[in-house]
Image (tube, coloured by chain):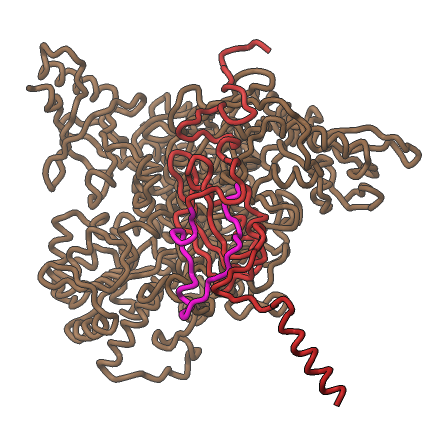
Amino acid sequence: MITIRIDGRDCPSRPDINLLHACLEAGANLPYFCWHPELGSVGACRQCAVTQFSGPEDKTGRIVMACMTPVSDGAIVSIDDAGAKEFREGVIEWMMVSHPHDCPVCEEGGECHLQDMTVMTGHNTRRYRFTKRTHRSQNLGPFVKHEMNRCIACYRCVRFYRDYAGGDDLAVFGSHDNVWFGRAEDGTLENPFSGNLAEICPTGVFTDKPFSGVYSRKWDLRGAPSVCVHCAVGCNTIVNAREETVRRILNRYNEDVNRYVLCDRGRFGHGFVSASSRIRAPLRIIDGQRIAVPTQDAMTQFARMAANGAVVGIASSRASLETCFSLRMLVGADCFSTGQTEQEQSCAELAHTLLGQHPGRLPTLHEMESADAVLILGEDVCATAPRLGLSLRQSVRQPAFHAADATKVPRWMDAAVRTLGTECASGLFVLTPAPTDLDSIAGETRRAAPDDIARLGFAIAHRIDAGAPDVPDLTEEDALLADRIATALMAAKEPLIVSGMQYGSPALMRAASGIAAALAGRTPMAGLSLVLPDCNSMGLAMLGGLTLESVMMKARSGGIGTLVVVENDLTRRLDPASLAELMEAVRSVVIIDHSMTPLCQDATLVLPAAAFSEYSGTLVSQEGRAQRFFQAVYAAAPVQASWRWIQALARSRNGQETGEKPDTGTRPAATGLTGWRTLDDVLAALAWEFPALAGAVKTAPDAAYRLENQKLRSQTYRASGRTVIRSHISVRDQPPPASPDTPFSSSMEGAYTTDMPSPLVPGFQVPSWNSVQALNRFQQEIGGSMRGGPSGVRLFADRTHENGNPTQYSYSADIPEPFTPRNDAVLVLPETRLFGSEELSMLSPPVAARAAPASLRVSARNSASADAGAASASAGADATPRASVTLHLTDGPHVLPAEPLPGLPDGIVLCPSHMVAPGFVFPRLAHLTFAAPEGDRS
Amino acid sequence: MLDTLRTLMLTFLHAFQRRVTVQYPEEQPYLPPRYRGRIILSRDPDGEERCVSCNLCAVACPVDCISLQKAEQDGRWYPEYFRINFSRCIFCGFCEEACPTYAIQLTPDFEMSEYARPNLVYEKDDLLISGTGKYPDYSFWRVAGVPIPGKERGESAHERPPVDLHSLLP
């Protein structure tokens, strides 16, 4: 710890940071633009000028750029010094010379860093009387709006987009004061993190386009801390709502997980909560017609159904922990299904087991960024867990940081460190069947079938620890590759192995776990990360239950009277024949879901559940982190949380049978399903039934929590329209809606401080800082932990420090046979896409607009035969035909355009299963025939 | 006796003095143009809505009686709905002061009495007038940098045509 003196005030600080960072941490108001805690310093904007004095005798000092000056012990700086103030005022005046008169019609207005900084410097009168320079803007696709007139040339956008997120279609063009940031050609921004430009850009050049369609000023938005539901990474978000509709999703800083960045699927995938596919009232299917009925009728009908045979519950990996648990309480453990196929469930449970056994580290996303050697084993993380992919992208910079340390260049000196980095070897190895976005920065890549990758993985484990089983008949090329990777991993201080269940291969995950365990024998920092498909896959794996196949068995034997399906579209998990058989075998089906799914056609009763923005609950991310999401929208009855519907079902069933049953004395009073009043009761019961999940209770303060003897406010102190917003319905004032499950008040009344518990931060705003940069004040150290403590609870024990007592790890000897391409059939692998594969985000219009049409990705050899087939079929045609290919599955042929994918191994095709055959389990062998497109035959 | 006569005389004299009572409503009082009465939304000199739904009036309102929602047509922002609850309004004029486009103005009209409170909730249709109000010449869109139909990029007041990015000349 060192001390610096800022304007006569001694402030504790840290070495290895710059003066700007130190001043902001000390709570000083120092304007800046180009610096960003995650991007480092480049000194582009010249805004953070301060006067530094060489000693107590020095009265003149010299102006330095705070962001480019390292902190030294005893440094004396002045922010209020007249010279520095004048300098800063001059700089912002130049920036404002060409800034348009746009604030009233700018989406950034009210949360604009440029507005804040202009006020902070004191520049308030325009002296420049001449004309303003203007720029053309582009249509950058459905996510981001572009308005280049507002640019102040801080270079944050290209530094984030190109250097941090690895995009290459946004660049800076032009010269001198004409510099222009955009794409070389008009078109959609391709990078999956483009939405962050809206938060990174300090002014209104890049803004959130879907939000602009339902725009509201920041001060009018109710905020609720939430967790992204579109993949298993568990990024922390803030849901912003007004007039009981969700308006946008913002990033919520979590030191360990997503930090400053969200992927576009998470940021723009929330559209499903206001889509027309939402269910708003209980529906009964009478003669094929869906008829809205009162809740009471629906409950009476369920009571009738429940009296007529056993009730089996099917949960879902996208439902909250509380929902799944209450369903289990309703139907009993014997009749509770996780709603996953055998393949999915065995993989998820294996992931849970492997992570639980792993003798090394289970790194968080932030810890992954400091891994110095990473092996990706058969998982396209950029599609299945995009934010994790971005963390791995940062890990490649470790050698550059080490080189910078060696040459005494501070790590935050961004341009210099990146220049050093161009000459450093990458420690990233990507072994996947198909190309990934990380290939361009990988040290080595290898394309092979999942089984071959697993074999390579086992071979690497054997090379690290001779105790691991060896792989017979490895090709010489693979043996050499395994040697190289093993050497690199063994040389690393923090090696990391990443795998997942994208290809449904337990062998891949076992191989990954084996390598990580072998490395853990050398260093306790050896990390293992396994990617899961859905936001609560891990939570469901910890609960356990029957597979869908077991439910089918039960149904066939006539053991199911009523099926209660909660937030699960079974058409995505069971092929049409099996689903039809299941629906035939059960007498009635109750569906509790927030969105209309194809399954609803077969239901007897459909109940409207709350979406993630309308209730509070807990999700367990793939790294075993239990996190709470809170209600931002108070949905109109009868929409309510799924667990409350399940409770209502239980009450109606009990009412039918024996009336209200008193709770037995051996359990806590609240464990009875029908007795629960709030979310805390559900969690208490959950902790009682599943001690492994007991940590979920402490994920966030309970509903009784009070800060400064008050609830927490979820609206800003200056929210507008309170007395008019619903006066077209009734001019009488209504009490604000109550939120029994959370410590939040739904209005602007309540406490809000910078050190409030971080799982409860509803938004970032402090006096003088209205933009998202206000986050700096909520952090203990900028870029470090939050003042309000950590957010989320890890449910897995950390074994990093158990060096003295290493757990005995038994290597799996189940090494698969090598894959050999067949002539009569191809191995169809599921193609997971960032936009398209995930169910809920596809109901969001901007994400649906980014989803590419279905096509079958074929290898070069298959593609050659396809071209030959097409050429022979369309001989004489002028235009080059695009080959189409027919995939024969058990439900009949699927005709798709074929697209050659360079590097795909022979005998393998990639099929976007979510569009083509959502119910089928992949990988599977299938027959393929090539034909010319139909249009060319005419 | 004398006192009584004096009182009578004074009383009769008042009969010849100027009357203070105004015969409202037959006789309308003069109110200055900047009187703070009924709120209206004005149009710009081109006859288009002036309100750009920036929400500044709503946030300035001390009784929170203004609510609106932004909508957009070809780059031009306008309120999808604009609602003032006059049963709450205190006619402070802060909204007019906050308005960057002179859209919202207070007028010298105060005759707004209603028998039912819901009738005091004014929607955009009730608020929008067809003139420019007190500020005949100002048009925000001529000054703002955002292009709208009829005004290309670089054609706003004090603007140069868009930069040619292919030129490296100073």
Determine the residue positioned at 44% across, 27% down. Answer: B151
Residue A179: % across, % down: 55, 20
The verdict on residue A827 being magenta is: no
The verdict on residue B110 being magenta is: yes
**Foreground residue, A896 or B9?**
B9
Which segment is the magenta one?
A: B101-129
Residue A699: % across, % down: 50, 60
Query: Which chain is depicted red?
Result: B
Image quadrant where one finds the N terminus of chain A: top right
**Foreground residue, B123 or B166?**
B123
Residue A148 in the figure: left or right of residue A915: right
Q: In this view, does A332 lie above or below A231?
A: below
Q: Is residue A700 visible?
A: no
Q: Could you say which quadrant of the image residue A560 lies in?
A: bottom left
Q: Is residue A932 above or below residue A528?
A: above
Which residue reaches farthest right? A57
Q: Is residue A736 above or below residue A824?
A: below
Q: In this view, does A243 lie above or below B136?
A: below
Q: Can residue A841 be seen in this view?
A: yes
Image quadrant where one finds the C terminus of chain A: top left
**Foreground residue, A249 or B166?**
B166
Residue A321: % across, % down: 39, 60
Determine the residue positioned at 52% across, 22% down. Answer: A180
Q: Could you say which quadrant of the image residue A842 lies in?
A: top left
Chain A representation colour = brown
